[in-house]
Amino acid sequence: MHPQLNSHGELRHLLSTEGLPREVLLRILDTAQGFVSFGDREVKKVPLLRGKSVFNLFFENSTRTRTTFEIAAQRLSADVFNLDIQRSSTSKGESLLDTIANLVAMDADIFVVRHAQSGAPYLIAQHVPTHVHVVNAGDGRHAHPTQGLLDMTTIRHYKPDFSSLTVAIVGDIVHSRVARSAIHALTTLGVPEVRAVGPKTLVPGDLRAMGVRVCHDIDEGLRGADVVMMLRLQNERMAGGLLPSASEFHMMYGLTPERLALARPDAIVMHPGPINRGVEIDSTVADGGQSVILPQVRFGIAVRMAVLSIIANAGA
Amino acid sequence: MHPQLNSHGELRHLLSTEGLPREVLLRILDTAQGFVSFGDREVKKVPLLRGKSVFNLFFENSTRTRTTFEIAAQRLSADVFNLDIQRSSTSKGESLLDTIANLVAMDADIFVVRHAQSGAPYLIAQHVPTHVHVVNAGDGRHAHPTQGLLDMTTIRHYKPDFSSLTVAIVGDIVHSRVARSAIHALTTLGVPEVRAVGPKTLVPGDLRAMGVRVCHDIDEGLRGADVVMMLRLQNERMAGGLLPSASEFHMMYGLTPERLALARPDAIVMHPGPINRGVEIDSTVADGGQSVILPQVRFGIAVRMAVLSIIANAGA
Amino acid sequence: MHPQLNSHGELRHLLSTEGLPREVLLRILDTAQGFVSFGDREVKKVPLLRGKSVFNLFFENSTRTRTTFEIAAQRLSADVFNLDIQRSSTSKGESLLDTIANLVAMDADIFVVRHAQSGAPYLIAQHVPTHVHVVNAGDGRHAHPTQGLLDMTTIRHYKPDFSSLTVAIVGDIVHSRVARSAIHALTTLGVPEVRAVGPKTLVPGDLRAMGVRVCHDIDEGLRGADVVMMLRLQNERMAGGLLPSASEFHMMYGLTPERLALARPDAIVMHPGPINRGVEIDSTVADGGQSVILPQVRFGIAVRMAVLSIIANAGA
């Protein structure tokens, strides 16, 4: 059985962009597009999830991602419950699956799960009844599929034809669930050239197995790109010795106006946020005319509304 | 004046199962029964508490119980406010009754109170105006009436005739508000034999005053029982020297398949959760065909919906 | 451009009572009056903000104030999001304005901001698009305008003619945003005598520039007053050496029944809460017939409903 699709090939759980067929990805993007202008409405509320119970299970803290899911669910009229996991029964030694079984008994409809362990959302998805749905909101280094999908929505908004694009992803690719989710989606949607750009410690050669072109030289990586996706530099990487310092990273891989000029003149600049100004990206670029960083945030709400409404209507 | 009933004998506050007349208990159980199938509905929402303000006042942390009340109140369409008591004015030295008076001035309708001090919900109930209602969500070692009522709903679902039952409650009876609330309800509902089963340190002989049969021998306690209610073993008890160790407790009082075989073949096994697998209960029993632990959780939502909707409609 | 009004002179942001024209203040008070009896309704809910997103941004913790805004917004049918700022991206080094830009991209309609830095809500108001509104819920020592407005609503309820009143504000005036917001509103509304009463360390002579009469003698300050506004004594002041001790403060400036007898017989006693019983106010006064401390709390919900509904309807 497919871990994410039901017997009719419809999306039941969203766990990863990997393994999702092109038509499923496109259906999400099309649905998201319909929700993009939703934020301009006088009344930002539709009854698509009225009377459904959405549980935010954030085993790893992320106010930002949790809030976007809460906004999306509320705008769909769902009842949203934020579980304070750090203070809950799991700290009394209850197992993850016992916690889930209890919440299912409370008639949960959808679990939105963030977990430090890769695979935790899969484990949950395998143990819920067929009318219950799971959305991965980030698991370890593995996947962050709604981020990947909002990146695709953003790209399609500005560059409608995936089949002619060159996309450069710059930064710490190997530890990034954001990069991983984007690469799988870009490949499935037919983008002919995806480049992974960064130092050898963060972009090892074996990433080629994912179908990307590995570039250790930033200029080579950016040249002629239609889309530049910058990744957030995690401070932990520096502590771990994989990187010398934030300023050296900026010198070698930071996105400056000069470097951006190597990309196509109409290239867009993306970043999952929160940005480190002056580290992976210059403020002039982040705030400049080619930046679509804030539209990404808006598309993020639309994509999450799309995913929640699609899975809620998927049968067994 | 009755602390829980109004002048018409209707439930105004739910503070304890002790002292509640049989017909009041039965009315709650009947109402809960009507809400049990509610979770299967497409839209889990009724407007019974629309525009009412329910305040969760958890002076003692319990994500699990708080969430069940939040779910129940939301499904009744109430506005629910979770006060972060640890970070609020009480830490600025405001007295409990001043905090309550302030919230009453904000037009609170219902307070759901969890407090480490036995009696705190009574104190609050004595000081609110007649249109405001209090539900005890657990006070010290005293009472946890919605847990007691969900236990009764569960028992009646599987064993409709209280007057023919033998119920064995196993574990740390003396410190348990769950046990206390269950015993009072069982007695009022006419259960002829309620057994308190456990070591002398946790089940002293003077419990007989509550109308229970005290059994220090687990086999004697379980023999012929229709209902086996296991209690959660609190780790604090071991630290306090009342118990040798978790594994010794399991050896002497843990519910194994062999021991369960002493009860009636159609006996049900209950537990308030979260369970300590391998301590008070074996996994094979917890997950087995006689276990009704997860249905208890579901009945818990129904009972809380019943209590909230009943008290909200009680006059002075 | 006026920081708080749009081109039609309507309230766009509420940042301070300072600089607000009399007619704008009166419109808020009139609107609040209409919401005062709202709490008595069977269904405390109007759809004035349905489908609007209100974000509570409390950079400084205040469960009490946050809850009053949450109640007000919920009763207006808004979707309310409480951001856990301490745990959010700001702790990852994201700037305040980047956080705001992100939330605007999520289609926020109203920000309710509490911040330790005076002026933070102004900064935010300067950087949001015209359809987004900011309410200051307390910034440093600067302003707490909804508190000031609820004080005015309370005064007008009991003493309808501002032009004939003597108002005594007693306590730590110089550090109090509550006092500052009240003084500006009282002056604009035409109160002929506003007295600032307290020791020289807390009520320096240069407060006269705000148009108040400075009284270091409590008896002189209270004599003939129609309204006595007590301020909360902050413990930090004692630690800072500005005050000897709580009991000495009580002896010199605490409101006792004897001192209150110096005011007019029909004088009202106010306090922003939470009260320190036996420090700035005696229990007999706080709980006595002249105290309107709890009605203030109720007016506080009405004023916040008024402010939220007025600004939400203000255009550019």
Image (cartoon, coloured by chain):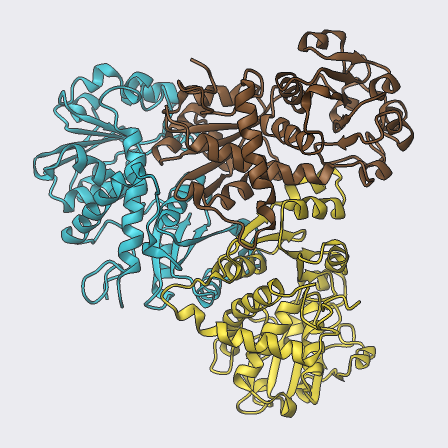
Chain colours: A brown, B cyan, C yellow
| Quadrant in which the C terminus of chain A is drawn | top left
| Quadrant in which the N terminus of chain A is drawn | top left
Q: At x 66% / y 64%, what residue is drawn? A: C315
**Residue B197 x, y percent position in the rendering:** 22, 30
Residue A25 placement: quadrant: top right
Residue A86, visible in the rendered structure:
no
**Residue A146 x, y percent position in the rendering:** 59, 29
In depth, the one of A295 and B73 nearer the eye is A295
Residue A235, above or below B107: above
Residue A283, visible in the rendered structure:
yes
Q: At x 71% / y 74%, what residue is drawn? A: C20
Left or right: C47 in relation to C276: left
Residue A191, above or below C40: above
Residue C304, above or below B278: below
**Residue A210 x, y percent position in the rendering:** 67, 11
**Residue A58 x, y percent position in the rendering:** 54, 33
Residue C249, above or below C120: below
Q: At x 74% / y 44%, what residue is drawn? A: C98
Q: At x 39% / y 54%, what residue is drawn? A: B78
Label tally: 0
Left or right: C85 in relation to C157: right
